[in-house]
Image (tube, rainbow, N blue to C red):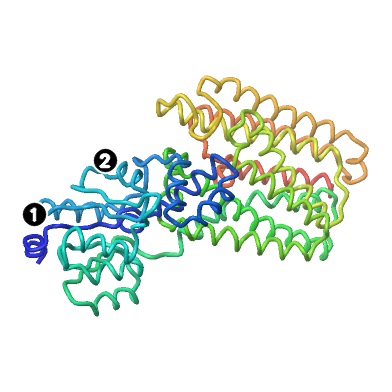
Amino acid sequence: MLQDTVEHHPMLAVDLDGTLLRSDMLHESFWSAFSRDWRTPFAAAQNLSEGRAALKSHLAEAADIDVTTLPYDTGVIDYVRAWRDKGGKAALVTASNQDLADRIAAHLDIFDAVHGSDAAHNLKGPNKAAFLTETFGPRGYAYMGDTDADLPVWKGAARAITVNAPPALQKQVDAMDGEVEHLSTVTASAKPYIKALRPHQWLKNVLVFLPMLAGHQLGAITFLQSILAFIIFSVVASSVYVLNDLLDLKADRAHPRKCLRPFAAGTIPIAHGGLMFAALITLGAVLSLFLTPTFLGIMVVYYITTTAYSLTLKRRVIIDICTLAGLYTLRIIAGGAATGIQLSMWLLAFSIFFFFSLATVKRQAELVDSAASGKLSASGRGYHVDDLPMVSMMGIASGYVSVLVMALYVQSPDVMQLYSSPIALSGICCILLYWLSRMVMLTHRGYMHDDPVVFAAKDRISQVCVIVMAGCAIGGALL
């Protein structure tokens, strides 16, 4: 059947967004440009007033997209190659910008012609249908597409080929005259959406319980306030993870493991990312109203800081590590604000040094990966592989200072009031010293997960260390 179609109508027109590519170049261009310049949304709004074609042209110029790492649909590529092997020709016909389309076609090397939008003409829907009919004649082509915007094009095609189209759209295409073929190259699933929220990262948010535990205030109201604070932080943090993934698409695709993240891999449409981000941040803001105004203010600070981190701070040497350490500590401060518990300077000092150490280990792990893959720098960061010894030393020094702060705290009057046997807390210092040293050593050997907190949650020895430290704390309170 395919052979007959190729013989009678040899030209195959292929759509780009959502068909050849498991993404959308308009959204790709927007987020890439936004990651380079925070003023992009304002410039985009101005260009949109002149039409979508002008917007696409502006974003294509402002973006920095590596077409070699885009999430292409291998099933579609194989189909195009099979079409050409049978003697047919293929053209990439897309509403995306002509320059981007040319670069993609040059990379794939499977098309005989490339037609895209320019600053004046948006090659989409009826415009695309008219262009194809004028170029190849009525029903002089087969067309591969994926959305209802392609319906006018399919109506004029000799063969309509849908790619991962929903059932309702397939029925509309089936009702048309001419040959119809439905390709399914992916399986719909909720798993990528859950993965994009990074629920495993919510482990960090248990820090909001620390003021309650450290202050030995275990009442029901305090516990419920801490739980609500945990939920809010998890929701808002997930919104930031989504935003960060959208802004960091290029760097993620260049990373050996982060390239599997849903947006980078194309398992979630980028357009859905913006909706997810907006819904999550709105939910977090509404829930924050049920706690104190101070807590709401801290959440605003957290959101602004994380957004600034995603846009620029993560590329600033040292500042990025300080920001990560501050965001960890902010969770503890938020726990105190949610419950009205006064935080001690001992706790804040310990958290700053301890989490600075963990943030440094995170950067150390990225540099170790870069060195192993022969790269001179960590993609999307301000560090070079040559910085690895210095970064390692900063992590070790800061970690050991946090242990010193803990040792001094054990001897303070505050501990005498809260614990019947303060000496039992000394065991925590010993365990921390061992655990931090081991984390740095594992990172040095290339065994560390991208995030040390997630690694610790899965690591058996780290779990034992946490249990032993908890036993020391309980023993100091009860013995």
Viewer-proximal residue among 148 and 382: 148
For marks 1 and 2, give the one nearer the viewer. 2
Tell me if 232 is positioned left or right of 343 in this view.
left
Q: Position of residue 177 (x, y in %)?
A: 19, 77
What residue lies at 47% left-to-right and 45% top-to-bottom? 249
SS for callout 2: helix
The disc label shown at residue 86, or none? 1
Distance between the alpha carbons at the discs numbered 1 and 2: 21 Å
Q: Earlier in the sequence, mark 1 or mark 2?
A: 1
Q: What residue is at 44 percent from the left and 57 percent from the top?
A: 52
Coordinates of residue 365 in the picture (x, y in percent): 53, 32
CB contact under 8 Å: marks 1 and 2: no
Quadrant placement of the N terminus: bottom left
Can residue 184 be seen here? The reply is no
Q: What residue sits 79% from the left and 47% below the top?
A: 333
Q: Which mark is residue 106?
A: 2
Q: Secondary structure at mark 1?
A: loop
Q: Residues within 10 Å of mark 2 (few under 14, many from 20)?
A: few
Give the percent coordinates (x, y) of residue 41: 57, 50
